[in-house]
Image (cartoon, grey):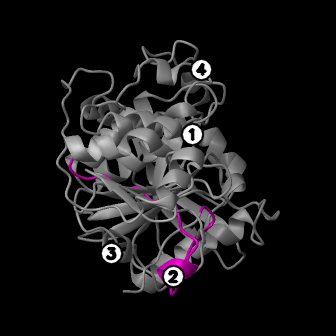
Amino acid sequence: MRNRYLNRRQLVGSMTFAELPFLVFLLCCTFASGQSTDDWRSVAAAQSFIHDRFDNNCIITVKASKNIHVYAPGQQLDTSDSAAIVQRLHNTTLLLCKYAAAGSTPVSTAGRYAVVTAGNTIDYLTRKDVILYSSLSKWEALRTKFEYGDKQQLPVFVSLGSLDTLQLKHKSPACPWGLKTKHNSLKVIGLLAVFTFNRDLAGLIYIDGDASILDYNVLPTDYTALSQASPDVIATSNWRTPVLANGGVLMFRNSPGSHRVLALWWAYRCLRHDQPGLWRALIEQMPGGKLPGTNHQDLWLPYHSQPVLHHFAHTHDLIRRESGFQTPWKCDGACGWVYRETGCLKEPLEIPGLLLLPPLPVDA
């Protein structure tokens, strides 16, 4: 079988497993909800926020002048002017815009995976300067998402806007320290909004604004086929500094479980970075709801979340055994030691509900 993986910057295909750079993926599907509807971490609470803050009657197109045009009649927007959009949204409304190719209507969502990206402004998404560690700009990276959707007839969504006042006042039982950046996790609530307003989707792929699609022939099903046990989540690390899962490229199946993970991730936004909230959401869906031998709450104190990968690398075998997981790991020898000591994977690692892929090939 010819395997295809994803790295942090590119959707890559047509390589053998040994040659492949991998991408970050998240495929969340069958986790139990386990929370009451009035819980601040619940899907119901997050969806109530979505219905209050999002306008999904929005179409986004690429004009011949090489800019983005937004049509949102409920906001009286029919413009390519980023400043005008910011002024109209007034930091109180977010847009969920569906892409339409020139002269066409948007692709149907029925039974398909959607490609999703997010940004606070059109100016951010269309910046022309070259991205770090890439040869492309954000504008060129955005175009790859639209072109991929056109080729594969997949719907493409852009979550757009800011909630600065609300975000800067944010406090929660999990984050009494508040947020250090006003854009923290807005992409996350945008992902749940895609599912909330498009119940017939099969799933979605989230790709950061600075990540591009390289191979337009690879399909979402090429990634789900890599597992022997139909995992809920597929993820990978950074391609430089290892972490449990990188939040820059994610894949979700449309299910109550994936909605639960997104609601938790949104609820756990805190301080400057959004990835610790993702890690916490993933761990709380593992058997037992925490990493064995850890004080779960202590892991999420400010600046303490880096040991998450260390603890997981040392306990994943126990999680597998205690859950009766049958799929063997191909890396019980030297490469297993490398993972425990460095967090670098050579072979895919699967536990119930989660498949982790190497971010880069390892020859040792």
Q: Earlier in the sequence, mark 3 or mark 2?
A: 2
Q: Quadrant of residue 38?
A: top left
Front-most of 316 and 52? Answer: 316
Res. 50 visible in picture: no
User: Mark 4 or mark 1, which has the lower sequence index?
Assistant: 1
Secondary structure under badge 4? loop
Range covered by the magenta-colored residues:
8-31
Q: Which mark is residue 80?
A: none
Q: In the rendered image, which residue does mark 4 sit on?
A: 302
Q: Main secondary structure of the magenta part?
A: loop
Residue beneath the point at 33% across and 46% down: 317
Q: Please give the label number shown on residue 13.
A: 2
- Badge 1 density bin: few <14, some 14–19, many ≥20, Cα 10 Å: some
Q: Secondary structure at mark 3?
A: helix
* Residue depicted at x 52% and y 68%: 6
Could you tell which of marks 1 and 3 lies nearer the N-terminus?
Answer: 1
Going by the image, does 286 lie left or right of 103? left
Secondary structure type for disc 2: loop
